[in-house]
Amino acid sequence: MLLKTDEISIRLMQDNMHDYELMAKWLTDEKVLEFFEGRDNPFPLERVIETYQPTVCGEDAEVACFIYYQNQPIGYLQYCALDELTQADRETYNLEDTSGVYAIDLFIGETEYWNQGIGSRVISKLVDYLFNELNVRRVVVDPETWNTRAIHCYEKCGFVKVKLLPKHELHEGEYRDCWLMAINRNK
């Protein structure tokens, strides 16, 4: 386990069929896809393997993880250092210095666990881990502006809106605005 608390644990995603099948289950669920990737962009098993295997095997910068609640896998999260951003990306994200800056992304794939405060608990645990174990100085995320549930969850965890990113992410056939949100480590 990457981290374990009372009811929440986070473990690295494994290069095995069980983990890929879980991802395919979540990423073909229309309720999940409405908020993550888009309902017009499902990930059946073959696409999950093609997309996530390089990350799981360490070929990409992202660290892929599964979220557990009461010992049941309920979702996915990833994080990565942003120190390799191009100058154009730094300007887009309003980040002059990306050293010690990490980005996160996550979803709860088991929809019966939505709206119970689990997402905010996971985010808080992840941010604590990044700040205290990896010595990260800032964590950023870029939810779409219409995803008020996600934005509220990040705000509840201490993230603040930093910059509007117009037409930033393709979702269900159109480019949508996103909020760049950030939280800084207290020194």
Image (cartoon, grey):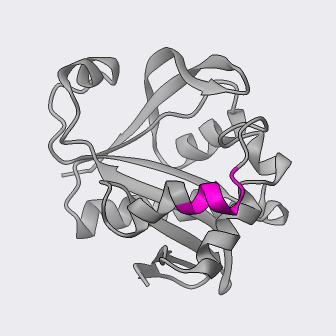
Q: How far across and how far down the image is residue 131, in percent? A: 28, 60
Task: For residue 5, say whether it is visible.
Answer: yes
Residue 97: quadrant of the picture: top left
Magenta: main secondary structure: helix
Q: How far across and how far down the image is residue 49, in percent? A: 56, 63
Q: Is residue 35 left or right of residue 4?
A: right
Does residue 183 lie above or below 63 as drawn? Answer: above
Q: Does the stretch in magenta take in 98? A: no
Does residue 102 lie above or below 41 as drawn? Answer: below
**Residue in the picture at 70% in, 33% down:** 148
Does residue 153 lie above or below 161 as drawn? Answer: below
Q: How far across and how far down the image is residue 130, in percent? A: 31, 61
Q: Does the stretch in magenta take in 47? A: yes
Task: Please state the extent of the stretch shown in magenta in the rendering.
Answer: 43-49
Residue toward you, 187 or 165: 165
**Residue in the picture at 18% in, 42% down:** 83
Q: Which residue ends up furthest to the top in the rendered image?
A: 166
Does residue 87 lie above or below 28 as drawn? Answer: above
Q: Is residue 19 left or right of residue 137?
A: right
Residue toward you, 111 or 16: 16
Q: How far across and how far down the image is residue 44, in percent? A: 72, 56
Q: Is residue 93 left or right of residue 123?
A: left
Q: Which quadrant does the N terminus fall into? A: bottom left
Residue toward you, 66 or 147: 66
Task: For residue 74, say whether it is visible.
Answer: no
